[in-house]
Image: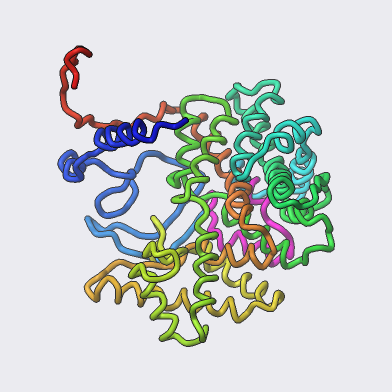
């Protein structure tokens, strides 16, 4: 039986031992969260992979500029427009670009896609033992333990030779959607009383189509536009520079030369944290609350008043946060959000949810103004929507369960994780990542136990 007094006293002591005066961070010039005083990130590495641009620096001034995202130097807008104009899916092409640094020709893309498709299936015993037999109430948790389980299937799991890292990366990228789909099926069977449906991956389908097939069970159960939107989501989430929390976690653990399965599991653990992943779920919940409490979704004054209530902690979850707004790097605009918004409108029309989409659009329009009112006219802070603002709406239109929102992010981002690992371990000047912490606890004498109070 748990002793409440014991844990209460222990909690008091632990809490006291963790207290640090905030003024000490300024005194010792500590970059909390690896952020400079002006909000920009502390430069800790170099990369050839992705570039996230949201501001420029002129002397000591940080100047907001329209956001840009580049994969291997190519603008994400050009990448998405490229494959969309050709009426095809672009995730495999994006993975190839991230790994190799150049776009594949038709033959290279065909061979690459076929190879990835051939790796999708999981061994029957693995599915039974790692996913179905072991209960789990969170898809990311099941994914993490399953990735660690893949270590046991690898004949050379600890090798960091380049050819081995490439093989491991392709195998993991290909299997991620299958593991996520099976994990979700197991979860809904165990905890929601639904029929357990484990389907074999289809090599003739694109990654987006195959995932929809695995969770819906019928190639006719989703439209072309639905598959196009999911493919676009995977592309937009594939990479976001080395500074985002999960990718940085991947690089930190990889720098120790641990195996890829341990590193990816650490990145999944980072993504599972609510400050990194899952924002689109909170956006969806916020908008559901708004739909219930706003009588006229087209009335700007009513919507504005409700947004002010949210900021004043008088509405929604009383956190004072308008979810899906703001970003660590992007200030004026998030290019991923702009790309997604255009296709999301098409999907809203197809699904008969245009009125709901227009409410999202109105919130996007009004929030910067409401934020200025809340902060005061002297405030210079610029805010914009981020990719999470519309992604939850898109997943809802696709009839995808909330339990899959962040795992779908992982399906896209694992390609970036793997690429950053390979880059980290092939640097000519690679070093174990080890930042410094200054101890401010002070010196204390050891007291014999008979003298302690």
Residue 108, image x, y percentages: 74, 45
Is 363 positioned to the left or the right of 154 in the image?
Answer: left
Instruction: Please state the extent of the stretch shown in magenta in the rendering.
Output: 71-95
Residue 74, image x, y percentages: 54, 55
Where is 286 relative to 258, above or below?
below
Q: Is residue 407 magenta?
A: no
Q: Is residue 83 magenta?
A: yes
Frontmost residue, 452 versus 424: 452
Is 366 positioned to the left or the right of 106 in the image?
Answer: left
Color encoding of the figure? rainbow
- Image point 28% across, 36% down: which residue? 12
Where is 382 relative to 127, above or below?
below
Q: Is residue 79 visible?
A: yes
- Image point 74% across, 48% down: which residue? 189
Quadrant housing the C terminus: top left
Frontmost residue, 427 versus 175: 175
């Amino acid at each position: 039986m748990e002793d409440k007094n014991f844990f209460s006293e222990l909690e008091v002591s632990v809490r006291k031992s963790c207290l640090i005066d905030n003024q000490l961070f300024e005194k010792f010039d500590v970059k909390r969260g690896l952020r400079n005083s002006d909000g920009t990130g502390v430069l800790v590495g170099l990369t050839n992979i992705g570039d996230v641009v949201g501001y420029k620096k002129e002397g000591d001034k940080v100047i907001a500029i329209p956001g840009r995202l580049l994969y291997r130097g190519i603008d994400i807008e050009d990448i998405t427009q490229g494959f969309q104009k050709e009426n095809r899916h672009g995730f495999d092409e994006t993975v190839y670009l991230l790994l190799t640094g150049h776009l594949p020709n038709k033959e290279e893309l065909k061979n690459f896609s076929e190879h990835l498709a051939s790796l999708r299936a999981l061994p029957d015993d693995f599915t039974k033992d790692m996913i179905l037999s072991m209960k789990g109430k969170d898809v990311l948790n099941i994914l993490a333990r399953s990735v660690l389980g893949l270590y046991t299937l690898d004949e050379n799991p600890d090798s960091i030779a380049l050819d081995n890292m490439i093989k491991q990366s392709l195998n993991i990228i290909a299997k991620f959607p299958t593991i996520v789909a099976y994990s979700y099926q197991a979860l809904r069977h165990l905890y929601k009383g639904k029929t357990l449906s484990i389907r074999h991956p289809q090599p003739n389908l694109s990654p987006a189509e195959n995932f929809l097939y695995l969770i819906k069970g019928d190639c006719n159960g989703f439209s072309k536009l639905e598959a196009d939107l999911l493919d676009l989501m995977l592309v937009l989430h594939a990479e976001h520079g080395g500074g985002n929390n999960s990718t940085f976690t991947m690089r930190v653990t990889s720098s120790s030369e641990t195996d890829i399965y341990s590193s990816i599991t650490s990145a999944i653990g980072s993504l599972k944290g609510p400050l990194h992943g899952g924002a689109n779920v909170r956006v969806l919940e916020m908008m559901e609350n708004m739909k219930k409490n706003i009588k006229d979704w087209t009335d700007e004054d009513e919507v504005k008043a409700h947004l002010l209530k949210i900021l004043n902690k008088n509405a929604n979850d009383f956190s004072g946060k308008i979810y899906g707004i703001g970003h660590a790097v992007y200030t004026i605009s998030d290019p991923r959000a702009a790309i997604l918004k255009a296709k999301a409108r098409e999907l809203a029309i197809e699904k008969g949810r245009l009125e709901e989409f227009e409410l999202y659009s109105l919130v996007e329009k009004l929030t910067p103004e409401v934020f200025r009112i809340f902060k005061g006219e002297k405030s210079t802070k610029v805010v914009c929507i981020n990719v999470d603002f519309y992604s939850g709406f898109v997943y809802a239109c696709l009839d995808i369960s909330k339990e899959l929102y962040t795992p779908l992010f992982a399906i896209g981002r694992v390609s970036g994780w793997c690429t950053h690992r390979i880059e980290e371990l092939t640097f000519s000047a690679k070093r174990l990542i080890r930042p410094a912490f200054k101890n401010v606890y002070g010196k204390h004498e050891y007291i014999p136990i008979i003298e302690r109070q």
